[in-house]
Structures are given as structure tokens and as C-alpha cells.
Image (cartoon, rainbow, N blue to C red):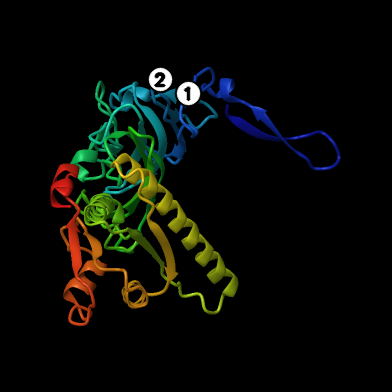
């Protein structure tokens, strides 16, 4: 439906909207969405003529559509300018930006791959070749090409789950977060495993200003990256506790925000932190059952403060804590700030109990052999 703005004939000014889709030449198309989202619609000037054109991604079984604004209130179907996109895919969202600063707008499209798996299909980055073509289209050739793999923005899910059933991109957006003149990309997805567990994966891609992107999610502080290594850490700690006749304690530290002058905001942030901790514990309880620890009842502890100081304080208060198990990140930049601080930083010499560090790359079989 395309809605036009009009006024009524009464003496008082009133606004009325009329459906002008058919008259504008974009009526009669069918749009489908089997997942919990609306199809992505964007107004964008793909050919730099000053008139906003219309892109509509679609659900499974239906093609994406691109309409060119003719500047006279009508549109013409230019969907042939898009590359062939598998109609078996459920497309969820779209957002445009000139990511390569060449003077025309490009498109990023999210995919819901609920029937596939962790290797794809992946999200889509459509590079606009308008400027490369000299400000024109080439007859018989698409104007947009998918460069997601070459650019490094495929968004393959890597949550703390078992064998993946699939994943879905729920939200995405372009923003130049580091103000270097090259627009960056944020993508938020959700993944499901075969057992029904769900996890979110947020990714921040930094534009390297050369047509490619790098994943700076962990480095930027957007997430602590725990989704990449908590699962093997939990499996090792639970297995070790069972084999030694001990118990398992899970600690979640809510770090205080810088809201001293905004007490209401500080309280909300604290409540959100506690809610997140409880959600993580629920996920861990389900994971323990799937790992075969049905009868294990871990102690769940939520504290607020600096992570390292809070861990030390808890160990001093509870003499039954004999070993601290930490997960090491898969990130090539290092094992993670907490591991670096406790295992190789200023706390190392004074730490009162042994520390076991579990690599995030270990499989379930390797974990069972070690525990």
C-alpha cells in the first residue's frame, strides 16, 4: 500500500490519507513474512536523480522488488537490477548507506536461516555499481552485486549453544561510530539450537575504509564476548565438580555504571543487570541438563561491583570455593580482560586458590576427557 496525503473539504483543516499504490504502479504485489518481523522496506535514491526509489525485501517464496521513482508520481519495476536472491530465503530487514564512499547508496539485507545452520546462508551486502558504470545501468546486467563475503559482513552466528538449527537477523543499522568518515555496521541476530535453546549475537563491524570490515564487537565493549567460550567453561566446571564430589557455583557480576548523578537511571541499569544475570542462569541450567548433569543444582550468585575485586571478596567469604574456572576467549587479540587480569596481572601473586582456564575452542569430547 502506498499512502498519499490529502485534505478534507471541511472548514477545519483535517488530514486524510488515500491509497494510491495502484495509480503509482506498485499495487498488486504480495509480501510474505513467516517469522516475527515485517519485510524490510526502504526509500533510497539508488540512481542519484533526486527522487526516492522503493526497495521491498520479501519472505520465503517471493522475490525482492525494486521500483524506480519516475518523478511524476509513478514508479517502474526495476527488480531486474537486483542480483538473483534465493527465494527459499526469508529476508528480514534492509538498510542502505554509501559504505564505500563512491557516491551511490549500497544495501545490507538480513536473512532468517531457520532451516539451515551456522554456515549459512548468510546476510547480503549489495554493492551499487551506479558510479562504476558511469552513472548508468548496463543493459542485461544487475546494478547490485553481493559482496558480503569479500567485505567480511556475512554475520555467521556463533552463540553458546549446541548444534545449531538456524539463526535470524532481527535488526541492523549503519552508523559511523568512530567518526572516521566511513560508515560502520551493527547487526543483531538470534540463534536456535536443536534442543530449543536461544541466544542473541550482536556484532559491530568497523569499516576499514577499503571496502572491507572487521569485527570489533569485543574490542569496542559492546559485549564481553562470553558467548564464544562460556559453553565449554560450564561443561568443564560441571564435569570437574561431579568427578571430585564437589559442587558448582555460578557467579554473575553486575558492574556499576557511571550514573551517580542520575539515581533513577542507575537503579534501572542495576535492575536490567540482575534480569540479564537471571536469564544467563536459566540458559546455563538448560545447558547443564543437555550436557548430562540433570541432578546438578548449581549455586547462583549475583553481585555488584568490579569483577576481579568481587571474585576475590567472594573467595575470602566462602572457604568452600576451591578452584576458580574461567573461560578464555577465541578472539585473536587475547584471552579476555578478566583472564588477563587474574591469571597474568596484578592479582596473580596474591590469588588465594588455583585458577583453571578453559580454552573456548575445545569440543564437548575434549572437555569430557579433561574434566
* Viewer-side residue, 187 vs 223: 223
Name the residue at 37% across, 24% down: 79
Give yes or no for contact between labels 2 and 1 (Cβ–Cβ under 8 Å). Answer: yes
* Viewer-side residue, 239 vs 38: 239
| Quadrant occupied by the N terminus | top right
Is residue 189 shown to the viewer in this render? no
Q: Residue 78: horizontal and vertical position, in percent?
A: 38, 24
Query: Image quadrant of residue 84?
Result: top left
Name the residue at 35% across, 77% down: 313
Query: Image quadrant of residue 107?
Result: top left
Mark 2 lies on a secondary structure that is loop
Q: Residue 54: horizontal and vertical position, in percent?
A: 46, 33
Mark 1 lies on a secondary structure that is loop
Q: Residues within 10 Å of mark 1 (few under 14, many from 20)?
A: some
Q: Residues within 10 Å of mark 2 (few under 14, many from 20)?
A: many
Name the residue at 53% across, 29% down: 72
Cα distance between the residues tagged 2 and 1? 7 Å
Left or right, residue 359 beside residue 127: left
Q: With respect to residue 90, does 262 lie above or below? A: below
Residue to which mark 2 is pinned? 62
The numbered mark, 2 or 1, whose residue comes first in the sequence reads: 1
Q: With respect to residue 167, does 229 lie above or below? A: below
In the drawing, what numbered circle is on residue 32? Answer: 1
* Viewer-side residue, 311 vs 55: 311
Left or right, residue 267 beside residue 17: left
Q: With respect to residue 72, does 98 lie above or below? A: below
Q: Residue 223: horizontal and vertical position, in percent?
A: 34, 58
* Viewer-side residue, 297 vs 359: 297
Picture mark count: 2
Left or right, residue 251 beside residue 264: left
Q: Residue 189: horizontal and vertical position, in percent?
A: 37, 43
Amino acid at each position: 500500500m502506498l499512502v498519499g496525503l490529502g485534505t478534507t473539504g471541511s472548514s477545519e483543516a483535517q488530514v486524510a490519507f488515500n491509497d494510491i499504490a495502484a495509480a503509482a504502479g506498485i499495487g498488486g504485489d504480495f509480501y510474505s513474512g513467516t517469522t516475527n518481523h515485517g519485510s524490510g522496506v526502504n526509500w533510497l535514491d539508488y540512481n542519484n536523480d533526486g527522487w526516492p526509489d522503493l526497495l521491498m525485501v520479501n519472505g520465503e517464496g517471493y522475490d525482492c522488488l525494486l521500483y524506480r521513482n519516475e518523478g511524476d508520481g509513478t514508479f517502474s519495476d526495476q527488480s531486474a537490477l537486483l542480483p538473483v536472491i534465493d527465494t527459499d530465503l526469508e529476508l528480514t530487514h534492509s538498510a542502505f548507506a554509501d559504505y564505500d564512499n563512491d557516491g551511490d547508496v549500497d544495501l545490507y539485507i538480513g536473512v532468517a536461516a531457520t532451516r539451515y545452520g551456522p554456515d549459512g546462508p548468510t546476510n547480503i551486502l549489495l554493492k551499487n555499481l551506479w558510479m562504476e558504470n558511469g552513472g548508468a545501468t548496463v543493459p542485461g546486467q544487475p546494478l547490485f552485486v553481493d559482496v558480503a563475503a569479500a567485505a567480511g559482513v556475512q554475520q555467521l552466528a556463533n552463540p553458546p549453544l549446541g548444534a545449531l538449527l538456524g539463526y535470524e537477523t532481527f535488526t541492523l543499522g549503519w552508523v559511523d561510530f568512530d567518526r572516521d568518515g566511513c560508515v560502520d555496521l551493527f547487526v543483531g541476530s538470534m540463534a536456535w539450537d536443536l534442543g530449543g535453546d536461544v541466544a542473541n549475537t550482536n556484532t559491530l563491524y568497523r569499516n576499514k575504509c577499503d571496502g572491507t570490515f572487521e569485527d570489533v564487537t569485543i574490542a569496542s565493549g559492546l559485549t564481553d564476548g562470553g558467548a564464544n567460550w562460556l559453553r565449554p567453561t560450564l561443561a568443564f566446571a560441571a564435569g570437574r565438580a561431579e568427578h571430585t564430589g564437589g559442587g558448582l557455583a555460578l557467579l554473575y557480576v553486575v558492574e556499576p555504571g557511571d550514573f551517580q548523578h542520575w539515581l533513577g537511571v542507575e537503579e534501572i541499569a542495576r535492575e536490567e543487570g540482575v534480569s540479564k544475570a537471571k536469564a544467563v542462569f536459566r540458559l546455563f541450567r538448560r545447558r547443564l541438563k543437555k550436557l548430562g548433569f540433570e541432578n546438578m543444582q548449581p549455586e547462583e550468585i549475583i553481585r555488584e561491583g568490579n569483577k576481579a575485586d568481587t571474585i576475590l571478596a567472594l573467595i575470602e567469604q566462602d572457604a568452600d570455593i576451591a578452584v576458580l574456572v574461567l573461560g578464555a576467549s577465541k578472539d585473536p587479540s587475547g584471552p579476555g580482560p578478566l583472564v588477563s587480569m587474574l591469571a597474568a596481572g596484578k592479582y596473580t601473586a596474591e590469588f588465594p586458590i588455583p585458577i583453571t582456564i578453559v580454552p573456548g575452542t575445545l569440543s564437548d569430547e575434549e572437555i569430557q576427557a579433561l574434566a
